[in-house]
Image: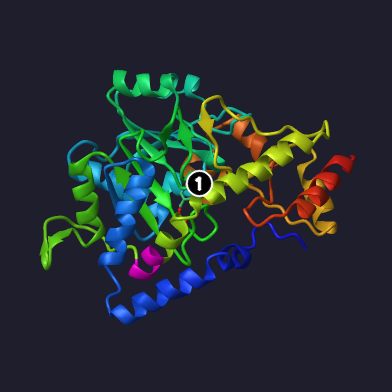
């Protein structure tokens, strides 16, 4: 079986260093808010070209904390609107609604899968305070249209960079282009911890100080609580693991690009629409997502032939039971895409024999 993602194989590449890191943390007797976290925060900020980084418990919290911090700073308030791509993972929407902000969904472009910036302007109202743009599947989602709109309407640009560690646009790195960015180090992400972890990056010191305070019980000084915060911290052991893996992330990105280029070059089945690579974008291929009408049939056919694929995502947020209040909204492009997208295996450990097998199966697939 070619698994969609083999985490055991991926982490085996760094096994010796990961075990050394674990031993170091165990022996230190210090498990939270210590030097492993400081080191990782510094290194990850540098990696993103951002001034500051705060490690938090997971990617959802990273995004939630950004909005909560803007509310505490008086820049946003309950009932304000945030523009989000309709086809994102539900966490992006949860981060907004958890803060009593209103999600305003906007359709994606059906080739890049990212928010269609030409459709943002008609979604802006006097209550709009931010765009939460998602670099979905690993490709940059920011463009000049979006930046101009943010300037013109005084909107905060927040990046959901959960799937895009190291992705670039015009030589800038995701996570430092907007006003703030939320990152996830969920094990299956390109930079994955061995458990949950996340981070906020920004060049805005005031925002970062507030995020750090809120993530630690609303406290900047032990037992003094200036805000009603939460407990969302990155464990020392995860910071130590992530610092090991961060050293190899550029190698990982290169390997993913090789796999993606192989797919782009060799998948020739006319039933299939391949993902579109934008100009000036450094795609990091968290997912390689193809589209076809006969998606479910191809998925079954691949599985019968021992190739596992996944769907990102089978149900759009506005169609989820959790968002009954959004169920009657209609986003035809997003709804069509949820029936057509299929994610092929992609990782640094996928060798060319396996790739050949996958591509041959796809090219011989008939309806
Ligand atoms: C994974 C992911 C998140 C949430 O990250 P967690 O660490 O799982 O909480 C948010 N947004 C997107 C687009 C994601 O893919």
Q: Is residue 237 magenta?
A: yes
Q: Position of residue 39 (x, y in %)?
A: 30, 59
Q: Quadrant of the C terminus?
A: top right
- The image quadrant of residue 110 is top right
Vertical comparison of 306 with 155: above or below: below
Mark 1: C-beta under 8 Å from nearest atom of ligand 1: yes
Which region shows up in magenta? Answer: 235-240
Q: Judge from the rendering whether residue 247 lies leftward or rightward of residue 188; answer left or right.
A: left
The residue labelled by disc 1 is 163
Q: Position of residue 142 (x, y in %)?
A: 44, 29
Q: Is residue 98 visible?
A: no
Q: How is the image coloured?
A: rainbow
Q: Position of residue 290 (x, y in %)?
A: 70, 39
Q: Judge from the rendering whether residue 309 lies leftward or rightward of residue 177; answer left or right.
A: right
Q: Residue at x 78, y 63 (%)?
A: 1
Q: Nearer the viewer, residue 131 or 160?
A: 160
Q: Is residue 37 magenta?
A: no
Q: Residue at x 85, y 45 (%)?
A: 360
| Prevailing SS of the magenta stretch | helix
Vertical comparison of 206 with 24: above or below: above
Q: Judge from the rendering whether residue 51 lies leftward or rightward of residue 242; answer left or right.
A: left
Q: Is residue 184 visible?
A: yes
């Amino acid at each position: 079986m070619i698994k969609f993602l083999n985490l055991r194989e991926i982490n085996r590449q760094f096994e010796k260093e990961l075990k050394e890191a674990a031993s170091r943390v165990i022996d230190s007797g210090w498990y939270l808010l210590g030097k492993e976290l400081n080191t990782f925060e510094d290194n990850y900020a540098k990696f993103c070209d951002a001034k500051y980084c705060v490690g938090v418990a997971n990617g959802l919290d990273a995004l939630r904390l950004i909005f909560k911090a803007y509310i505490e700073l008086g820049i946003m308030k309950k009932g304000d609107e945030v523009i989000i791509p309709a086809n994102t993972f539900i966490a992006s929407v949860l981060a907004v609604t958890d803060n009593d902000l209103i999600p305003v969904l906007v359709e994606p472009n059906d080739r890049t899968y990212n928010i269609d910036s030409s459709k943002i302007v008609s979604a802006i109202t006097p209550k709009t305070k931010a765009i939460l743009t998602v670099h979905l599947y690993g490709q940059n989602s920011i463009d000049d249209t979006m930046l101009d709109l943010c300037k013109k309407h005084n909107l905060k640009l927040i990046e959901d960079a959960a799937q895009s560690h190291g992705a670039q646009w015009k030589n800038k790195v995701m996570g430092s282009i907007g006003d703030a960015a939320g990152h996830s180090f969920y094990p299956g992400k390109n930079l994955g911890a061995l458990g949950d972890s996340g981070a906020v990056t920004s060049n805005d010191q005031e925002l970062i100080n507030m995020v750090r305070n809120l993530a630690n019980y609303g406290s900047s000084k032990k037992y003094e609580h200036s805000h009603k915060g939460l407990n969302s911290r990155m464990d020392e052991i995860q910071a130590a693991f992530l610092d090991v893996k961060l050293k190899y992330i550029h190698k990982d990105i290169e390997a993913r690009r090789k796999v993606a280029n192989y797919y782009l070059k060799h998948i020739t089945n006319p039933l299939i629409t391949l993902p579109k690579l934008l100009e000036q974008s450094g795609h990091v291929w968290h997912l390689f997502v193809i589209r076809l009408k006969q998606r479910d049939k191809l998925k079954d056919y691949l599985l019968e032939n021992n190739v596992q694929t996944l769907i990102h995502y089978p149900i759009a947020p506005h169609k989820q039971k959790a968002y009954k209040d959004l169920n009657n909204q209609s986003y035809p492009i997003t709804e069509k895409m949820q029936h057509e997208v299929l994610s092929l295996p992609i990782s640094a450990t996928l060798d060319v024999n396996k790739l050949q097998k996958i591509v041959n199966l796809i090219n011989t697939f008939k309806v």
